[in-house]
Image (tube, rainbow, N blue to C red):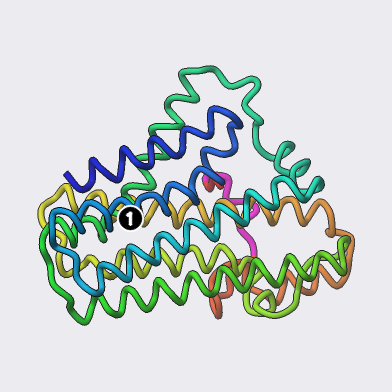
Amino acid sequence: MAFLIIFLVALAISAVGFYRYIWFISIGYGFSIAGIGAALLIYFGITGGLTAVSIVMAALLIVYGLRLGGYLLAREYRSSSYHQVMQQAIDNGKHVKLPLKLLTWVGCALLYACEASPIAFRLQNHAGTDAVAIVGAAIMGAGILLESVADLTKNRFKQQHPHRFCDVGLFRLVRCPNYLGEIVTWTGVFVSGVTILSGAWQWIAAIGGYLCICWIMFGGARRLELRQNKEYGSDPEYQHYTKHTPILIPFIPLYSVANAKWLIG
């Protein structure tokens, strides 16, 4: 029942993608996650089963989703250059047939529900607070903070240096710290559920959601790399930066995913 509820919430909110196709995976994503967090608090607040750690994690979903959705919405309307880049990178939906839009809509909603499913299953299974849940919540909070700082750093840097790649702050650690923050966030969610998941379906949903978002984040890193190679490829400083700074995972010498055409983001 819990999974059905969060799936329906994600389905309702991500429907904004019918207005603008890219919103299925951007603004619709952020606000769907916030809606899922709110739905879990409301439903289990009424039916019972909320614990301190589940309240914290559901609240973190709301914080995460509102921050991301609000940030993307503001950037969509305030940054004409960003809007133009995204329109070139992703189909704006004018040529997408309705069946594909419907498939995208349902697929996105299902993914968002699967990502958040460890929290929903913890509540559904009436699991109490344990050390793994606390660690997962801490990792989740760290990921949200990491992603927020990365977005803020790049936004401020681009205001001062609109024609230069960002290589300050967290961007000295990896080239895509915002995507890293996303992965860390969902790693925390997944970790929080490993002691309470029950049955094949719950494991499939939790593992599937986690692996899919990691795949998408690597795909996003690839898309950004290709775009930056085109824009800054002739800059010696950029060449040095890309050869000495991992693209996504700190301290792992993976400097490029440009040739990994199987990635999507």
Residue type at numbered disc 1: Ala
Q: Nearer the viewer, residue 63 or 246?
A: 63
Q: Which residue is mark 1?
A: 116
Specify whether 31 is left or right of 72.
Answer: left
Residue visible at 74% across and 43% down?
A: 83
Q: Residues within 10 Å of mark 1 (few under 14, many from 20)?
A: many
User: What is the magenta segment's predominant secondary structure?
Assistant: loop
Specify whether 200 is left or right of 229.
Answer: left
Q: Residue furthest front?
A: 46
Counting every numbered tag in the picture gives 1
Is 134 magenta? The answer is no
Question: Is the residue 199 above or below the residue 147 in the image?
Answer: above
Residue visible at 65% across and 53% down?
A: 258
Residue visible at 18% across and 54% down?
A: 46
Q: Nearer the viewer, residue 123 or 259?
A: 123
* Rendering quarter of residue 146: bottom right
**What is the x, y in percent for residue 167?**
75, 74
* Rendering quarter of residue 231: bottom right
**What is the x, y in percent for residue 211?**
37, 55
Is 260 magenta? The answer is yes
For label 1, the SS is helix
Q: Dividing the image into 4 quarters, which one contains the N terminus?
A: top left
**What is the x, y in percent for residue 24?**
52, 38
Specify whether 77 is left or right of 201.
Answer: right
**What is the x, y in percent for residue 45?**
21, 58
> What stretch of residues is rendered in magenta?
256-262
Question: Is the residue 141 above or below the residue 70 in the image?
Answer: below
